Amino acid sequence: MAFKPNKPSIHGETLDTLGLRLAEAGHPKYRAAQVFEWLYPRRAESADAMTNLPANFREWLKENYDFTATDVMGKKTASDVTQKVLQRLRDGSLIETVIIRAPMEGVGQEKSRRTICISTQVGCAYGCKFCASGLEGWKRDLSVGEIVSQLVQVCRIEDQSDPARAAEGLASFDNIVVMGMGEPLANYDNLLAALRIVNAPWGFGFGARRITISTSGVVPKILKLAEETMGFRLAISLHGATNEVREKIMPVNRKYPLEELVPAAKAFARKHGRMLTLEFILIEDINDSLEQAKKLAVIARELHAHVNLIPYNKVEGLPWVRPSITRQDRFVKELRALGVTATLRREKGHDIDAACGQLRLQKEKALGVEPPPPEAA
Ligand code: SAH
Ligand code: SF4
């Protein structure tokens, strides 16, 4: 069920929608652009910070909009390159945003490439058998404002390590991956509206090519995404190279089997002329055989896709096991021998890609359900 906050989030508005609302309330429409200048390049946390705007207008903004649809509750450094940020929504739900800082060749840690991994839902209905996010089912979709606010909060954290970029008004991150909690394409409209705000020149001006959407394979929505003018990158969570294996761990495969998923992925790649990524978690005795590697190679070659192998990350309460390093190596070697470009992420911090949803679960268990915070501007 959708959650209805008392006030709409300011981060859910566009230049057009805010302009209209302002005009209705008797304020000049051009103030919308001023508000966005404060919100995104200048990172204003509340209307009070918008010091060049008239006091009565700032009051109106405070009365009518929520400036903190997501609130940072805590941070956890998972490794030397990754940090998880726990955020609380107005109804008390918790979501995770992950910051992955990959050092850039030769320039040291202070000049790292920053990738932000965002959530799109509270929980997930898709119930993949290996995933912490799906363990307790789907609770609700994030709104447009919550998705954007989530990014703004993390941007503020990153501003501290890159004040020069922040001073220029640019986003303090280099890439966005939509790989956190939830199935992004199941919250298609809100996600796309949020990404349009992130992309807009009056928003973060953040290029679609630097945004990757990951899906477990919602075929009709992949086809829809292919028709969008914004050229996002697409990652498909494959995790099984045959229907038989995929079905064991991903219930979505029953609805959209490989014979539908592969052509849809192909249509997307053709439309956008971009290389796809196939995500493949290696789970012992489930999908790590040489036979699976060979079949995966056939799919990857057909799609001209890059394969990203992720050794399974242990989720408490689930029976799956990460294969030995020898078995992981054997798998990646087989793929490469068959002409596929593949990476095996075993560097420190690989756990973070996998562990989306885990921090939230631990926290919810430890805290019980938290009361919703009061709605302040
Ligand atoms: N719902 C989308 C995006 C979120 S999941 C999707 O499924 O693509 C993000 C990625 O983390 C997916 O590739 C997912 O399969 C992977 N993942 C989930 N649980 C994992 C685990 N325990 N170990 C390794 N990867 C995991
Ligand atoms: Fe949902 Fe993705 Fe986890 Fe599957 S892997 S349960 S689709 S978040």
Image (cartoon, rainbow, N blue to C red):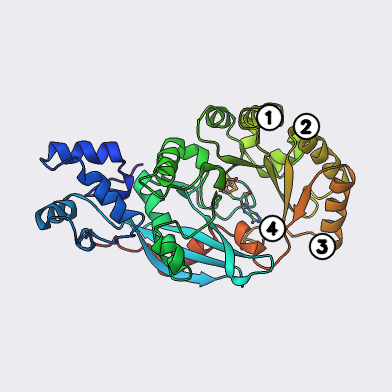
- Please tell me which residue is depicted at 78% across the width and 32% down the height of the picture: 302
Compute the Cα span from label 3 to label 1. 32 Å
Compute the Cα span from label 2 to label 4. 33 Å
Q: What element carries label 3?
A: loop
Q: Which numbered dot is residue 324? A: 3
Q: Is mark 4 on a helix, strand or loop?
A: loop
Q: Between disc 1 and disc 2, whose residue precedes?
A: 1
Compute the Cα span from label 4 to label 1. 34 Å
Residue bearing the label numbered 4 = 319
Please identify, in this view, whether the residue under mark 2 or under mark 4 is nearer the observer: 2
Residue bearing the label numbered 2 = 302
Q: Between disc 3 and disc 2, whose residue precedes?
A: 2
The amino acid type, in three-letter code, at marker 1 is Lys
Q: Residue 138, image x and y in percent?
A: 47, 46
- Please tell me which residue is depicted at 51% across the width and 71% down the height of the picture: 76
Q: Residue 338, image x and y in percent?
A: 88, 42
Rendered image quadrant of residue 274: top right
Q: Is mark 1 on a helix, strand or loop?
A: helix
Residue bearing the label numbered 1 = 266
The amino acid type, in three-letter code, at marker 4 is Pro
